[in-house]
Image (cartoon, helix red, strand yellow):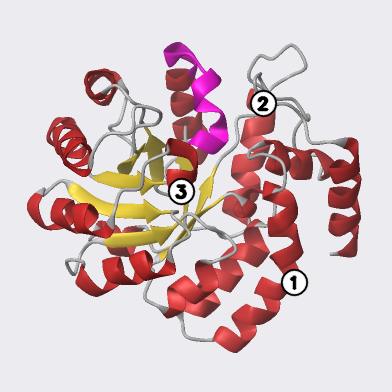
């Protein structure tokens, strides 16, 4: 079975719940994981940027990963986020993190240092050669400051065997379509844009790694399955039901938005580590109103 078939559908970019003293809230994390699994999502993504990984120590990351393996207990595939802007440091993590129970690694492009396209190619080539499991590229230029363009992605897809897919979150539909048109047959293409995934599936996407699926796991994953089956009329009904919620999720900050939603649903405390702070009281009230309307 290829990674493209294994990770088709909805993956949830898990949050990291914190207690009021800023320690990791493992019972809350277990609730979020079990809620997602019970609601029918296809796989989980732990230690992604939605999990506030820039504020986690390496020790905390490994503890979260081991806890996630234990709670999931092989019920679903697990993708592990391991990224950053120091290639050598990421290689060390790839070789020292417990990845035996993971399906793939998701690695965000380097942030801040803004490498050239050749630098991005060589960075990902080095990671793929060091990774013991398949590597999924993550292009999110709004966060990293540098777009991994279609030509570089396709070069990696065709030339580097252990690179198995991409999470594409550039908001550029033309770039997305170029990837779908020219990818190798077994190359996974998932969206990182909850609001765009419906038209992207129409263009050939395999699914999504979603923030919204933390809080709407059943509705969102149902929508994705309907779209992948070609029933866009039914999928559109759910899409437009959730559309205003997507805007609320990302209006001020991710993961502040998704944590506000999960707090209102009674799954976690509304606590984040600096420099990220809670959403404004006005936005929190509108989130509460939106959830009641559902």
Residue 220 locus on image (x, y percent)? 62, 64
Residue 225 locus on image (x, y percent)? 51, 73
190 drawn magenta: no
User: 18 left or right of 59?
Assistant: right
Q: Whole-Å distance between the Cαs marked 1 and 2?
A: 28 Å
The residue segment tinted magenta is: 49-60
Secondary structure found at label 2: loop
51 drawn magenta: yes
Say which residue label 2 marks: 276
**Measuring 63% from the left and 57% from the top, which residue is drawn there?**
217
Say which residue label 3 marks: 75
Residue 128 locus on image (x, y percent)? 17, 38
**Measuring 63% from the left and 84% from the top, which residue is drawn there?**
234
Dot 3 or dot 1: first in sequence order is 3
Secondary structure found at label 3: loop
Closer to the camera: disc 2 or disc 3?
Answer: 2
């Amino acid at each position: 079975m290829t990674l493209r078939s294994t990770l088709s559908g909805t993956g949830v970019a898990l949050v990291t719940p914190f207690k009021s003293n800023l320690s990791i809230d493992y019972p809350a994390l277990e609730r979020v994981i079990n809620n997602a699994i019970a609601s029918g999502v296809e796989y989980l993504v732990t230690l992604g940027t939605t999990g506030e990984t820039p504020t986690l120590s390496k020790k905390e990351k490994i503890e979260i990963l081991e806890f996630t393996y234990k709670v999931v207990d092989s019920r679903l595939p697990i993708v592990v986020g391991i990224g950053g802007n120091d290639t050598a440091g990421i290689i060390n993590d790839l070789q020292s993190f417990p990845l035996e129970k993971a399906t793939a690694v998701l690695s965000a492009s380097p942030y801040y240092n803004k490498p050239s396209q050749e630098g991005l190619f060589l960075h990902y080539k080095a990671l793929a050669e060091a990774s013991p499991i398949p590597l999924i590229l993550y292009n999110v230029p709004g966060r990293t400051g540098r777009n991994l363009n279609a030509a570089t992605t396709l070069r990696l897809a065709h030339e580097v065997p252990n690179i198995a897919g991409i999470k594409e979150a550039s908001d550029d539909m033309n770039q997305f379509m170029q990837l779908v048109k020219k990818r190798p047959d077994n190359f996974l293409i998932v969206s990182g844009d909850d609001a765009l995934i419906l038209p992207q599936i129409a263009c050939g996407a395999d699914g999504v790694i979603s923030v919204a699926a933390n809080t709407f796991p059943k509705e969102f994953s149902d929508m994705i399955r309907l779209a992948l089956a070609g029933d866009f009329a039914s999928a559109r009904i759910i899409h437009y039901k959730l559309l205003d919620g997507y805007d609320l999720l990302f209006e001020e900050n991710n993961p502040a938005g998704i944590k506000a939603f999960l707090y209102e649903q009674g799954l976690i405390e509304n606590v984040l580590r600096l420099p990220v702070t809670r959403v404004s009281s006005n936005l929190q009230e509108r989130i509460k109103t939106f959830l009641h309307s559902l």
